[in-house]
Amino acid sequence: MSRTVTLQVLRAGWCRHLECMADRGGRWASTPFPALCGLIRHPDAGWILYDTGYSEHLFHATQAFPERLYRTAVPVQLPAQEPMHRQIKALGISPGDIRTVIISHFHGDHIAGLKDFPEADFIALGADHQHIERLRGHRWRATLGGHLPALLPADFSARLRVADPCKHIPLPAWMAPFEYGLDLLGDGSLLGVPLPGHSEGQLGLFIPDAQGRPAFLVADACWSAPACRAGRLPASLAMWFSTHHAGQYRQTYQHVGAVLRREPAVAVLPSHCTHAWEAFVDEQ
């Protein structure tokens, strides 16, 4: 296996919203929002996923009321070939080869495929895991917050490694105001970056060297890289329904925007931004 860390960004389904929901300067027109995942090959740790996107499990988890409201509010498109376990099979990778899934946060569009990777361990921030565990049995609260606890494998807690105790590694000065990353593998190759505001404990991922360039996967810290670069926030309605702490979200959003403006060579990859995804693929 090559000693290089490689990153592919793949779409596992999408939903449609008004463009202006992600960008206050956007159009009042429906546009697709992809569910993007990172497929990482590490020379020692093997195959790793950053999130799983949508999977058929989401449709099973939203058959009953009130969970069906999730499917109504977020109409999901999932072609038969796009669930992540099928995409990696097409690349010659068995789902059992995925040794680790790094979870950005526990909203349904990021964890719907966890059950498809029975051999994987999981990494997440403790606060976010604790939050979804508290929501078990509180179906209305969970659904209205975009959480579907039924998507978690039965043995999830036994397979989870909380990222919080990992060693703090200083980030490059040009990543300011982000100061440190959590050394997820102990070798400095994958650094978890807390991105507070959108959820109880959202975890971004900084890869210092992904095929010769840095990459920063920022999950839902922003939904549109062009809007974030320009300092245009999502619509107030979107922030009201989709942020755990609005003040923290705005600060994180500003920090991501600062990196976007200052370091255009860095691949900053939100989980739902078609523009950033296409630019990354074109540059590979």
Image (spheres, helix red, strand yellow):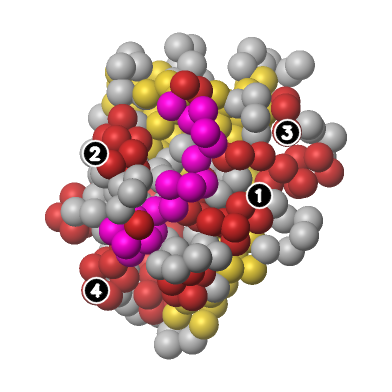
Which mark is in front, 4 or 2?
4
Mark 2 surroundings within 10 Å by alpha-carbon count, few (fewer than 14), some (14 through 19), many (20 or more)? some
Percent x, y of residue 180: 29, 26
Q: Give whichever of 148, 38 is nearer the camera.
A: 148
Q: Give whichever of 177, 101 is nearer the camera.
A: 101
Q: Secondary structure at mark 2?
A: loop
Disc 2 target residue: 177
Span shown in magenta: 140-157
Type of amino acid at the residue the image marks with label 4: Ser
Q: CA distance from mark 3 to mark 2?
A: 37 Å
Looking at this rendering, what residue extends furthest in the left direction? 247
Disc 3 target residue: 95
Which mark is in front, 1 or 3?
3
Residue at horizontal 67 percent and vertical 63 percent from the top: 78
Looking at the rendering, which quadrant does residue 1 occupy? top right
Disc 4 target residue: 236
Q: CA distance from mark 1 to mark 3?
A: 15 Å
